[in-house]
Image (cartoon, rainbow, N blue to C red):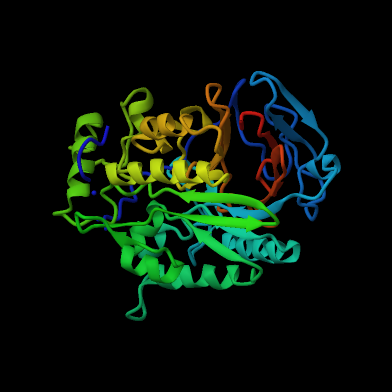
Amino acid sequence: SFARLPAGILYLLTFAADTEGFTMRSNGIVRRSSSLGEIQGESYYHTDTNANAPWRQKVRVRGGPLSAIGETTSPLAETASPPKLSFGVIADIQYAPIDDGESYGGVPRYYRHALSAARHAAEHFQEEKVDLVINLGDIIDGKCQEIEQTTETNPGIDAIRDVMEALSVYKHGEILHTYGNHELYNVNRNELGEVLSIPFFSEPCGEQVGYRSHLLEKDGTRLRFVVLDTYDIAVGGRCETSSKRKLAEELLSKNNPNFALGNENSPEGVEGLRRRYVAFNGGVGEIQMQWLRDTLEASKESDEKVIILSHQPLFPDSSNVVCLAWNYDEILDLLKEHNDTVIASFSGHAHRGGYKRCEESGIHYRVFEAALESPDPIKTYALVDLHDDRIEVRGSGDCESAVYLMDHMK
């Protein structure tokens, strides 16, 4: 619990949050299918054998009785009427102008191809004229700081500008950015706010935070995106004297013995849900929690539907626990109180993606697959359609398609 006021730039690159893990399903653990369409685990993990055809052939329908899961051939085939609104989603681009490499756990990473994937996604978003685009964070990789500098410019800033140029092909609406640990390995919050148009502001303690909300309104449909700053309480990007950083250090010291040994990014030897206490994660502070409560209550009064956005996952079984926000449990308790308003939570950070529906609240928790780990010619991103009774995820590349029913909304 963050009972008191909160947490600046450490380049913590010894262990990556997004390197290990399984995609957790309500009926067990399955690994992501390979980019070539090999089926591993369940049959819906299948990509079209034509590499130029982006949409997965099968999707999973989540909803109805919470224990019931069915399949349909395609959200495109099943949709009888056009969506109320649509938006694009891309997660963990992690571009760097370097050769392909591997994560800490040995998973291949395609740093340059990720930039091509981002440009292709933006072209598709513009072609479909989606109403909004969401970037779920880690737009560049921390390895940008290992590039030999030939000028006085920060290679991380240069890389962000490269990605922003690629995404600029999309002109139909706004791009809503979250930020993650890899941005903080490269730039401070002031710089980040300038290049990604994130409206950071100072809390009473004097420290910058980046939580906010954005209303998308179209033809009477009101959908509010609530963007959480899960690096509010964190060591990343916080100065040595930061109250938020000090609280983060206390939490890490208490829950992860590796922190005192200088291995702040390692969960080795830590059991269960406490594995989330690593320095590439963070949490939500007390003031932000109150803001979230106020925002959800105002959305209910205004008859708005809400989707929560964050870089870090919020639900334990939706992905690898190593990637969870530190005080995910407090956030979940608050969201449960507003399940008549909150449709879903969308996040990145855990590269293999994942999904879990909260059986108590009915809220859907989706972790989107990383663009970084799909080789050429695979390009991973999604288009999301909002209907009266469901949201449909149309996955491209290694992004799983799905239909999430809104039967929990009162």
**Rendering coords of residue 27 (x, y %):** 62, 20
In this figure, what is the number of numbered marks?
Answer: 0
Q: Where is residue 374 in the image (x, y as percent from the top left)?
A: 62, 50
What residue do we see at 31% from left, 42% from top? 265
Placement of 39 over or under 374, stated as above or below: above
| 339 or 119: nearer the viewer | 339
Query: x%, y% of residue 88?
Result: 64, 55
Viewed as shown, does residue 4 lie left or right of 82?
left
**In this rendering, position of residue 151 left or right of residue 71:** left
Q: Which residue extends farthest left?
A: 241
The residue located at (81%, 40%) in the rendering is 74
- Indicate left or right for 135 with 405 as reference: left
Residue nearer the viewer, 36 or 123? 123
Quarter of the picture holding the C terminus: top right
Q: In this view, does 8 lie above or below 302?
A: below
Q: Name the quarter where the N terminus is drawn.
A: top left
**In this orientation, does residue 347 appear?**
no
**Residue 151 horizontal/vertical position (percent):** 35, 81
